[in-house]
Amino acid sequence: MAPVPTLKSEKERKARQLIEFANSIPDRISGPTTDRSLVADLQEHVQTLPMQAPSARVAEFNTKGTELWNLSTRLSRSDDAPQQRLLYLLRAFAFGLLDCAQLRRSISSANCVRLLKVAFKAAKFCINSDALEHALKVLERVASYLEEFDKIDEELSPEDIALRAKLKSEYHILRTTLNITIAHIAADPDSAEELADTLYEIGKDLFAKKQYETAARWLGRAYDVLSEQEQEVLSNSAIELRLAIMQQLTKALILTRTPESLGKGRVMLAFIDM
């Protein structure tokens, strides 16, 4: 009678399959023609990630993830680059392996920064390739790492603190870019309202930090998203949101204190009072 698989043995089996698959990828790409089933296999394996790598295989996951990431970078720069779908799946898979390796360990600020930089590149590539579901998945992991970054009990230098703020800003920009892309594809009032609300929250946060010019830019985007919709199809909550955006945008424009922003602020104020 065959032994009943334990959770540990099942995790080891899945980890072994992932590593065996990762090892097979370079040969399947570098042959006379790319293995046509590779895209489907990559898609299947990407969907299983992340998983926590067994402790004995952490180094393997880290090494293979790095090797495949470097391979994807070289391929994207070559004259005979493979199809875009293969490239974005390869990047998502490579990041996934690095992510699996990290899940086993307590994270340091250096490791966190390294993974975030890889994740941002993967997410950007996926967004530019219209692989929105993969971009969303990667950015969900980014959000988790940013939370962990805040909890790291290390003495951070002023440079580290500035870097953390920059990484958070890049995450919000990428997430917003993704939302904009999704909204353009969906092109419905509900998606527009959700996107406008996201942009509004970013603008409000920047306004609270007295970054009035940048706040006005984000609030202006929020206003534009709702203004592009037919007003009669907007819900009551969307109409209220639009008014709140206009009020906050007016304040940001006036406090920016340039001739152009003051002019726009006066126009917006007159529009609110109509």
Image: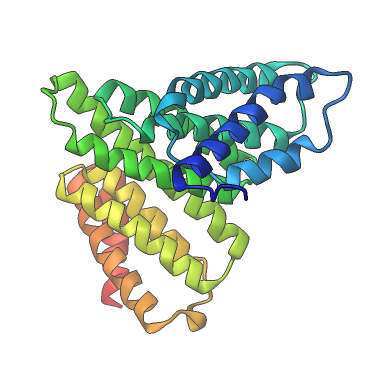
Q: Residue at x 35, y 45 (%)?
A: 143
Residue 246: x and y in percent read: 30, 65
How did the renderer colour the structure?
rainbow
Res 124 seen here: no
Between residue 271 and residue 17, name the one nearer to us. Answer: 17
Q: Residue at x 57, y 42 (%)?
A: 127
Farthest-out residue, front:
1
Residue 88: x and y in percent read: 64, 35
Rendered position, 232 above or below 246: below
Q: Quadrant of residue 22?
A: top right
Residue 169: x and y in percent read: 32, 38
Between residue 156 and residue 41, name the one nearer to us. Answer: 41
Rendered position, 8 above or below 75: below
Q: Is residue 150 left or right of residue 138?
A: left
Res 235 seen here: yes
Q: Is residue 248 left or right of residue 30?
A: left
